[in-house]
């Protein structure tokens, strides 16, 4: 007979692992399904200096600590990729590449990933000056010249933040500006932000660290000396398999209430995949705690109903 878990958690990043810890400590039968490595996007982060309790810790080290905590509670972690979801009814079914899982509640912590520039040198220099998180890595380039690539609010937000700690900040945008919460006046007030419109990034140079960004402007190749390239061209949630299953916003992120409940009963979402979430480890952990606690409450409530 197929096993029915109390809670299946999809995603082993900070949010999913925390949800598992809270649900397991509440006595629930829990499993975490992760298609890559526990820690999720932490593995792509160099040093973290804004997570309480650690003055400085690498993303990989913090991921190991999350994994150790989960293992200490005997939370099973299965390597699999969920391809199909049936989230209706009392028991939900999740079909993975390797096997099928059933549970009375589901927590979706499947995250999102930064869109890449897909240019030469980008992948090779990740963690060596190429970053997808200005809040995470900006402090490592204090007093230096840096570049932000992007056309929208996230690029302007990153530039404004970096302008407080860096010498000069260049914004390179190949398209028309797509601003909702900012304007060019916001950066004109800062004397150290330079906007380069119509600049198509072509290559990131450097061996052990970023030294320059090559771009095309009006058909002419130019080079910008910079210590870092912050990529801010948007994020993409991993929710393709969830279309028409639960409510998603226009960008594909999962809509929830403040208890992390989705539009499907017994299904919760937390972390980067959640709409309007700030993409920070600390917030993901907080949301995971809420999701794990609320999923536990849902299970207890369901059992009381079935016993009446």
Image: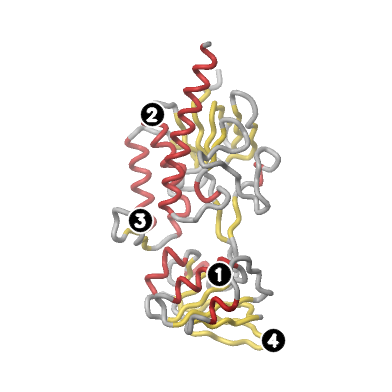
- Residue in the foreground of this view, choosing between 165 and 273: 165
Quadrant occupied by the N terminus: top right
Q: Where is residue 252 shown, x and y percent of the image?
A: 65, 50
Q: Nearer the viewer, mark 1 or mark 4?
A: 1
**Could you tell me which secondary element the residue under label 4 belongs to?**
loop
Q: Choose mark 3 or mark 4, whichever is in front.
A: 3
> Does 264 sit above or below residue 305?
below
Residue 220 falls left or right of residue 132: right
What distance separates the C-alpha of mark 1 from that of mark 3? 23 Å
In the picture of the structure, the residue carrying the numbered disc 1 is 155
CA–CA distance in space, label 3 to label 2? 25 Å
Q: Which mark is residue 55?
A: none
For marks 3 and 2 on the same chain, the one whose residue lies earlier in the sequence: 2
Which residue is the site of mark 3?
Answer: 51
Residue at far top of view: 308
Label placed on residue 219: 4
Q: Whole-Å distance between the Cαs marked 1 and 4?
A: 23 Å
**Residue at the spot x=62%, y=46% of the render?**
239
The mark nearer the N terminus, 1 or 2, is 2
CA neighbours of label 4 inside 10 A, class few (<14), some (14 to 19), many (20+): few
Q: Position of residue 235 (x, y in %)?
A: 58, 58
What whole-number distance in Å separates the C-alpha atoms at marks 1 and 2? Answer: 41 Å
Q: Residues within 10 Å of mark 2 (few under 14, many from 20)?
A: few
Q: Is residue 11 above or below residue 44?
A: above
Disc 2 marks which residue? 26
């Amino acid at each position: 007979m197929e096993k029915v878990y109390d809670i299946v958690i999809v995603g082993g990043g900070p949010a999913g692992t925390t949800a598992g810890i809270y649900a397991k400590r509440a006595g629930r039968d829990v499993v975490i399904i992760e298609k890559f490595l526990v820690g999720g996007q932490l593995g792509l982060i160099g040093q973290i200096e804004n997570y309480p309790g650690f003055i400085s810790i690498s993303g990989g080290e913090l991921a190991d600590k999350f994994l150790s905590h989960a293992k200490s509670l005997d939370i099973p972690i299965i390597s699999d990729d969920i391809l199909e979801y049936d989230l209706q009814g009392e028991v939900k079914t999740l079909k993975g590449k390797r096997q099928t899982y059933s549970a009375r509640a589901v927590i979706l912590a499947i995250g999102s990933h930064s869109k890449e520039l897909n240019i030469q040198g980008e992948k090779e220099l990740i963690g060596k000056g190429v970053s997808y998180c200005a809040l995470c890595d900006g402090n490592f380039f204090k007093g230096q010249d840096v570049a932000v690539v992007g056309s929208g609010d996230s690029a302007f937000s990153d530039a404004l933040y970096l302008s407080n700690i860096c010498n000069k900040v260049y914004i390179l945008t190949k398209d028309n500006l797509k601003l909702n919460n900012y304007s060019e006046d916001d950066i004109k007030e800062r004397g150290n932000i330079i906007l380069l419109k119509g600049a198509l990034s072509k290559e990131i140079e450097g061996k052990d660290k970023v030294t320059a960004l090559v771009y095309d402007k009006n058909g002419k190749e130019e080079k910008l000396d910079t210590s870092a390239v912050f990529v801010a061209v948007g994020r993409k949630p991993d929710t393709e398999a969830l279309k028409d299953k639960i409510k998603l916003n226009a960008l594909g992120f999962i809509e929830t209430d403040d208890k992390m409940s989705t539009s499907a009963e017994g299904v919760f979402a937390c972390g980067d995949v959640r709409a309007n979430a700030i993409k920070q480890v600390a917030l993901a952990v907080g949301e995971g705690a809420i999701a794990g606690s609320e999923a536990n409450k849902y299970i207890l409530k369901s059992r009381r109903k079935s016993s009446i």
